[in-house]
Amino acid sequence: FRAALDRAQQGGAPCVGQWLEFPGFTLAKTVASLGSDWVLIDCEHGNISDNDMYLAIGAITSAGSSPIVRVAAGELWLIKRALDAGAHGIMIPMCETGEEAAAIVAAMKYPSKRWPQGIRGAGAMFAPANFNQDGRQYLDTANNNVLVIVQIETRKAVENVDDIAATDGVDALFIGPNDLASSMGYFAFDHAKVPEVQEASARILKAAKSAGKFAGHFALSSEVAAQKSKEGFDFMNCGADIVALTTWMTTEMGNLNNL
Ligand code: 3PY
């Protein structure tokens, strides 16, 4: 995932992902086999238990893609579970201040010379195998390569975005446009039409770039993903399982109803 992000940042092909709201090894493996750089397992809003997350991480890795887990909140124990399951990156929703970002980074890192503030507990039983590494190699990978992705999706977060972007250890800022619009008092799904949201989005992108961090954006179609890539974002999803399923079924039922 990190290599794909570097490629995108250097002007190569965008780093494209998919998004899972449903549980299931077979589903995760099928989606991950479609060729995306990463697949997000949504433990914030999806129907995905702790055990489902473990299975999905294994399925995605075995298909040659990178599993990213969105935890339900920036809580130490949730971050620890997803890391110990072998995630290649963690996305944390609703990060609003530099202090919160620093606490997230501390939760993500094992204590070390480079990361004295780290508070992650040793003893990841399954994560090393998910990187084809032994426990010692994994300690290094975990601290240097597992991505810390914080979501910027509230008005308060936008006000503090420079502090968040500057936080040592934060690798990427990811915009959740629906929550961003909602926190500004607009209907979430209208985000693309609201100038205030678009201005905030440009500000977040600029903050990420100025701090030398990656910038990502939520998207539910290749059209939106391509637009975000053109604007300068490094990574974006281009769909989600629930949306693909419901859109396709609704269209097919509509076709018959219109006969
Ligand atoms: C948002 O659009 O608010 C997201 O977080 C994507 O699910």
Image (cartoon, rainbow, N blue to C red):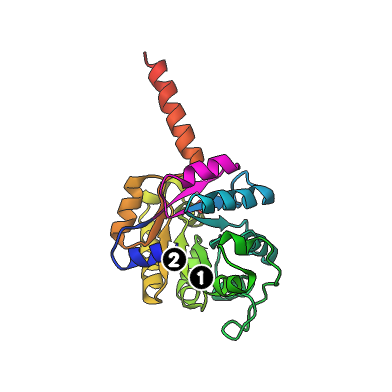
Residue density around tag 2, few if under 14, some if 14–19, many if 20 or more, within 10 Å: some
Q: Give the quadrant of residue 110.
A: bottom right
Residue appearing at x 53%, y 54% in the figure: 61
Q: Position of residue 85 (x, y in %)?
A: 64, 58
User: Disc count in the image?
Assistant: 2
Residue appearing at x 62%, y 43% in the figure: 47
Q: Position of residue 111 (x, y in %)?
A: 65, 80
Point out which mark residue 145 bears: 1
Q: Position of residue 236 (x, y in %)?
A: 41, 55
Q: Position of residue 184 (x, y in %)?
A: 48, 57
Residue occupied by mark 2: 2
* Range shown magenta: 16-38
| Mark with earlier residue (1, 2) | 2
The stretch drawn in magenta includes residue 18: yes
Quadrant of the snapshot with the N terminus? bottom left
**Is residue 29 placed above or below 233 in the rendered structure?**
above
Direction from residue 2 to residue 146 in the image, left or right: right
Q: Are marks 1 and 2 in contact (CB under 8 Å)?
A: yes
Residue appearing at x 71%, y 69% in the figure: 123
Q: Amino acid at mark 2?
A: Arg
Q: Amino acid at mark 1?
A: Asn
